[in-house]
Image (cartoon, grey):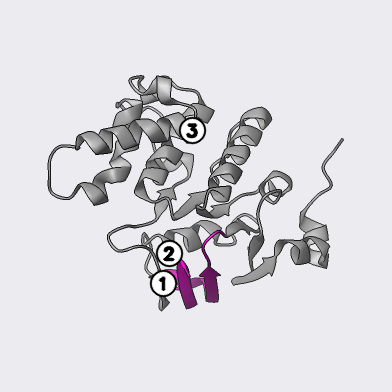
């Protein structure tokens, strides 16, 4: 298992947000985290990536030695006007593997460029991050996460604020990464698009988080209620 987390409780002050959450994510999984606003989805994500300590329970990561997961926060958590180039931001994903050296090796620089090429932004390496469109910026942040780990990416509403065409392109890109072996855990409100290539759903509501196989979720009363038919 890439993630094995049992009996997690999260709170803000005296208010308990989530209780007795159990999460197991295997290699190759594509998990969509869904639920109403304010249910605790982002809190749970921050707990999984180590940014918020659970009140109870432990998160165990079964990643390769010396590696970590790749985390893509909500857009507002990473300033659009950040004064750096595309390649400078992307290569911060290598900080864990770089160690104490103040410089990046030739192989690491090649890896950054290859990742940018994979995501269709190789020609933008020298451009200012702040000059890019929202969709292009999201690809840069995805490159940064992917350089941290090709095993597991955790994404918190990566398509928020993007137009429908860019959103579809981004989901197609995630599906390609998943088919190439990268496990995904992603918060999304756009369930019609997000569930197209996913295999599991984690639904968060009223302090609970319940796992479903995608097909089971779609045919359940809950799934029928929250996944609206796509307008044609």
Task: Provide the residue span drawn in magenta.
Answer: 1-28
For residue 119, which numbered disc appears in the image? 3
Determine the secondary structure under disc 3: loop
Residue 136 placement (x, y as % from top left): 49, 27
For residue 59, which numbered disc appears in the image? 1
What is the magenta segment's predominant secondary structure? Answer: strand
Q: Which residue is mark 2?
A: 47
Q: Name the residue: 36% across, 27% down.
A: 86
- Dots 2, 1 in contact, CB < 8 A: yes
For residue 87, which numbered disc appears in the image? none
Question: 160 or 125: nearer the eye?
Answer: 125
Q: Name the residue: 40% across, 45% down.
A: 145
Of circles 2 and 1, the one toward us is: 1
Q: CA distance from mark 2 to mark 1?
A: 8 Å
Badge 3 or badge 1: first in the primary sequence: 1
Left or right, 94 with respect to 140, comes to left
Residue 134 placement (x, y as % from top left): 51, 28
Residue 232 seen in the figure: yes
Residue 54 seen in the figure: no
Q: CA distance from mark 2 to mark 3?
A: 28 Å
Question: Is 87 contained in the magenta span?
Answer: no
Of circles 3 and 1, the one toward us is: 3
Q: CA distance from mark 3 to mark 1?
A: 30 Å
Left or right, 140 with respect to 200, comes to left
């Amino acid at each position: 298992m890439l993630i094995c987390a049992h009996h997690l409780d999260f709170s803000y002050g005296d208010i308990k947000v989530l209780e007795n959450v159990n999460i197991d994510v295997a290699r190759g999984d594509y998990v969509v985290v869904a639920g109403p606003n304010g249910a605790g989805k982002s809190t749970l994500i921050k707990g999984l990536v180590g940014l918020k300590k659970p009140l109870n329970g432990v998160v165990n990561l079964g990643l390769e030695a010396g590696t970590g997961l790749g985390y893509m926060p909500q857009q507002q958590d990473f300033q659009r006007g950040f004064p750096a180039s595309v390649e400078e931001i992307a290569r911060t994903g290598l900080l864990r593997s770089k160690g104490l050296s103040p410089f990046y090796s030739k192989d690491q620089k090649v890896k950054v460029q290859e990742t940018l090429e994979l995501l269709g932004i190789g020609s933008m390496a020298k451009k200012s991050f702040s000059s890019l469109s929202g969709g292009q910026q999201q690809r840069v942040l995805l490159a940064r996460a992917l350089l941290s780990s090709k095993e597991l990416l955790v994404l918190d509403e990566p398509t928020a604020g993007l137009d429908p065409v860019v959103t579809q392109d981004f989901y197609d890109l995630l599906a390609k990464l998943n088919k190439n072996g990268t496990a995904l855990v992603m918060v999304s409100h756009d369930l019609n698009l997000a569930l197209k290539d996913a295999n599991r759903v984690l639904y968060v509501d009223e302090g609970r988080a319940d796992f479903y196989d995608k097909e089971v979720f779609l045919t359940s009363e809950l799934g029928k209620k929250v996944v609206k038919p796509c307008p044609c």
